[in-house]
Image: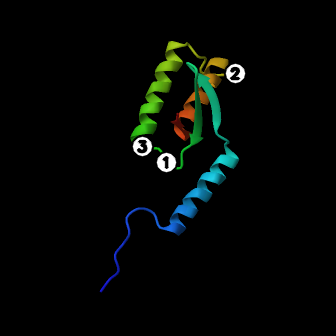
Amino acid sequence: MKGKKSRGLAASDREKSKKAEEYLNSILPPREYTKDGKLYVQYVSATPATKADVITLQENLDKKLQARKARETGICPIREELYAQCFGTIQVHIYP
């Protein structure tokens, strides 16, 4: 008779998950900020973005670049700011 599979993560899987989170936090430390008197902490997500997420993000980025009239070539502070926001959106989940 086969053994019952437990629901959730096994102890070794939880340890691996915790180590992965610690590793990600050491590379990209959580960001803390205050908004409307509340403290928020942003952590890097271990969950990869879906293709649909990336396409939606690209479309939104293109709209913002056009709306703010970012230069297509050369150094552009507007483009730099929007790309930084885009990169942060891909890799970060917000945990209040």
Kind of residue at disc 3: Lys
Do callouts 1 and 2 mark residues in contact (Cβ within 8 Å)? no
Alpha-carbon neighbours of circle 3 within 10 Å: few (<14), some, or many (≥20)?
Answer: few
Reading the chain from its start, which is encountered first: label 1 or label 2?
1
At a point 61% along the width and 17% down the height, the residue shown is 71
At a point 67% along the width and 19% down the height, the residue shown is 77
Most extreme residue toward the bottom is 1
Instruction: Report the residue marked by disc 1.
Output: 48
Do callouts 1 and 3 mark residues in contact (Cβ within 8 Å)? no
At a point 51% along the width and 65% down the height, the residue shown is 13
Camera-side residue of 92 and 39: 39
Q: Nearer the viewer, mark 1 or mark 3?
A: 1
Indicate the quadrant where residue 56 lies.
Answer: top left
Q: Nearer the viewer, mark 3 or mark 2?
A: 3
Camera-side residue of 18 and 71: 18
Q: Position of residue 14 (x, y in %)?
A: 53, 62
Kind of residue at disc 1: Pro
Reading the chain from its start, which is encountered first: label 3 or label 2?
3
Looking at the rendered structure, the secondary structure element under dot 2 is: loop
Alpha-carbon neighbours of circle 2 within 10 Å: few (<14), some, or many (≥20)?
Answer: few
Instruction: Report the residue marked by disc 2.
Output: 75
